[in-house]
């Protein structure tokens, strides 16, 4: 959205899109592109329930702060595949997903 890299340089400013457009690009329009709009792209009865819960309001947060958003839970096909440990504990849920170890 800002088209700004980590050094503060703006690349292709004319290619920038707003948050609503970006969200459609990764959901509804992506489903249409792969010709799966009847199963993917939005949360509706009869469609796969793939979504994530994040810790900040995507619409309200300033574009410059989007990289500070953290994923709390990811659901694929209606089943949790990842829960952030603190979030899971606070909700009384099982911790699901990749478990990191310091030494293999």
Image: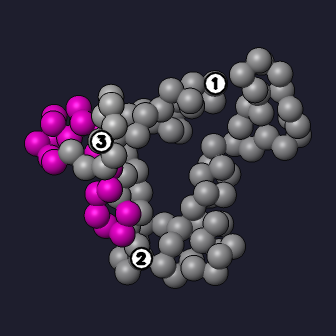
Give the label, 3 or 1, closer to the camera: 3
For marks 3 and 2, the one nearer the N-term is 2
Q: CA distance from mark 1 to mark 2?
A: 33 Å
Residue 62 visible in this rendered orientation of the protein? no
Mark 3 and 1 residues: CB-CB less than 8 Å, in contact?
no
- The residue range painted magenta reads 76-94
Q: Which residue has dot 2 on it? A: 47
In the displayed structure image, the side of residue 35 where residue 84 appears, left or right: left
Mark 3 and 2 residues: CB-CB less than 8 Å, in contact?
no
Q: Which residue has dot 1 on it? A: 64
Mark 1 and 2 residues: CB-CB less than 8 Å, in contact?
no
**For the N terminus, which image quadrant?**
top right
Any mark on residue 29, and which?
none
Q: Which residue has dot 3 on it? A: 99
Residue reaching furthest to the top = 7
For marks 1 and 2, the one nearer the N-term is 2
Q: Secondary structure at mark 2?
A: loop
For marks 3 and 1, the one nearer the N-term is 1
In the displayed structure image, the side of residue 81 where residue 16 appears, left or right: right
Q: Which quadrant of the view contains residue 3? A: top right
Which residue shows up at 31% across the image and 49% down it?
97
Q: Nearer the viewer, residue 73 or 96?
A: 96
């Amino acid at each position: 959205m800002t088209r700004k890299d980590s050094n503060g340089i703006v690349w292709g400013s004319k290619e920038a899109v707003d948050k609503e457009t970006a969200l459609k690009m990764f959901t509804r329009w992506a489903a249409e592109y792969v010709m799966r709009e009847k199963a993917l792209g939005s949360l509706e009865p009869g469609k796969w329930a793939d979504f994530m819960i994040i810790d900040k309001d995507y619409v309200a947060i300033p574009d410059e702060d989007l990289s500070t958003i953290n994923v709390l839970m990811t659901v694929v096909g209606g089943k949790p595949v990842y829960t952030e440990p603190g979030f899971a504990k606070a909700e009384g849920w099982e911790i699901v997903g990749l478990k990191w170890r310091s030494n293999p």
